[in-house]
Image (cartoon, helix red, strand yellow):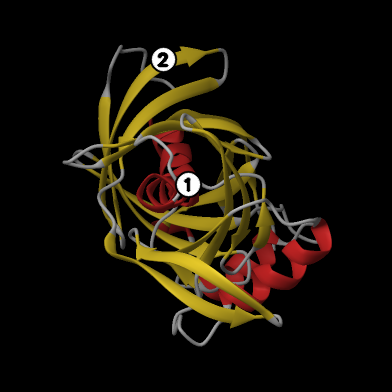
Amino acid sequence: MRFSKAHAYGNDFLYVLAADIDGRDPGPLARELCDRHTGIGGDGLIVYEPTPDGASMRLLNADGSRSEVSGNGVRGLAAILLRDDDRDDVAITIHSEGGAKPLVRTGRTASRQTFRAAMGLPVDLRQVTVTAAGESLQLAVMNFGNPQCVSLGPLPDEDQFRRLGPALERHPIFPERSNVEFAHVEAPDTVRILIWERGVGPTMSSGTGSCAALIAAARFGGAARDADVVAPGGRQRVQWRDDSVYLTGWAEVLFEGNWLR
C-alpha cells in the first residue's frame, strides 16, 4: 500500500488514497500505521480522494478513533497535492467532516509550503466550570469543526499537563471527547499553548487547536483577534475575522513509501 508522510510544525500525518486501502477497516489500520515503534509513526491517518477542486478526506487519530478535521492535516494534504505545481497563489479546497477548508498557497521555501486556510467560525462558544483530576477549572469550549476546550492562564507543568490533559479530553461534558489546549496570553499579539490532542495525547502543534486557543484568548483573555499562536513545534498566525478564522503556516512533505503488511 502506497503512503505519503507530511507534517506541520511536528504534527505529523500519514496519507493514503482511499482506493488503496482495499476495503480494510481504517481504524485498526490507523493504529497499525501510526505506531511509533512497529509502524511508520504519526499523529493520525488521512484517507483521501481527489476531487475537481482538491480532495476529500477522512481523519483517523493515532488510536484509531474518528476525527472530523485537522488544520495541520489539511495543510499537509494540500502540500502533497500541490508539490509539483509551481503556480503562485494557487487555491485548493479540502473537504472534511468538519466542513470544506479553502486554502491558498502563499509561499514556498525548499520543501516547505505556506498556506493561508479559511477554517470557519466557532459554534457554541461559551465558558464552563468543571472539576477534572481534582482541580476546578474554567474552560472556554466550542465546536470548531471538532470539539475544543481551552484552559486560559499560566501553562501547567509537565505533571499537571499529563494529569489534566486526559481528564479533560474524557470529561463527561464531552460525549465525543475533546481536544484540549492550555493557553497563556503573553501579549495581545502572542498566545503560547500546550496541546493534548483527542485520540493522540501531547502533540507538537495543532491547527484547529491554535485557532481555538486564539478564539478563547481573544474573547475571554484579552488577546487581539489577530495574533501569533506559539506551540512547542513553532509559531502560526491566526486571524479571527467576521467571515472566518484564518490560519497561516507551513507544511512539509517528508517521504513516500510502501507499507508491506
Question: Which residue position is annotated with label 2?
Answer: 107
Expressed as whole percent of the image width and height from the top left, the position of residue 95 reads 27, 51
Q: Amino acid at mark 2?
A: Gly
Of the 4 image quadrants, the one containing the C terminus is bottom right
Q: Which quarter of the rendered picture does the N terminus lie within?
A: bottom right
Q: Residue furthest bottom?
A: 172
Residue in the picture at 59% in, 66% down: 30
The earlier-in-sequence mark between 1 and 2 is 1
Q: Residues within 10 Å of mark 1 (few under 14, many from 20)?
A: many
**Vertical arrangement, residue 15 with respect to residue 26, above or below:** above
Few, some or many residues within 10 Å of mark 2 (<14, 14–19, 20+): some
Rendered image quadrant of residue 204: top right
On screen, residue 56 above or below 9: below
Between residues 20 and 143, which one lies in front from this camera angle? 143
The number of numbered badges drawn on the structure is 2
Disc 1 to disc 2, how far (Cα)?
Answer: 18 Å
Task: Report x, y in % for residue 188.
Answer: 46, 32
Residue 83: numbered disc = none
Kindly identify the amino acid type of the residue bearing the numbered disc 1: Gly
Q: Choose between 35 and 228: the one closer to the eye.
A: 228
Question: What residue is shown at x 59% (from left), y 44% (from top)?
Answer: 205
Residue 260, image x and y in percent? 69, 57
Q: Residue at x 30, y 13 (%)?
A: 87
Q: Secondary structure at mark 2?
A: strand
Write down the residue under mark 1. 73
Task: Tell me the SS state at disc 1.
Answer: helix
Is residue 180 at least partly visible in the picture? yes
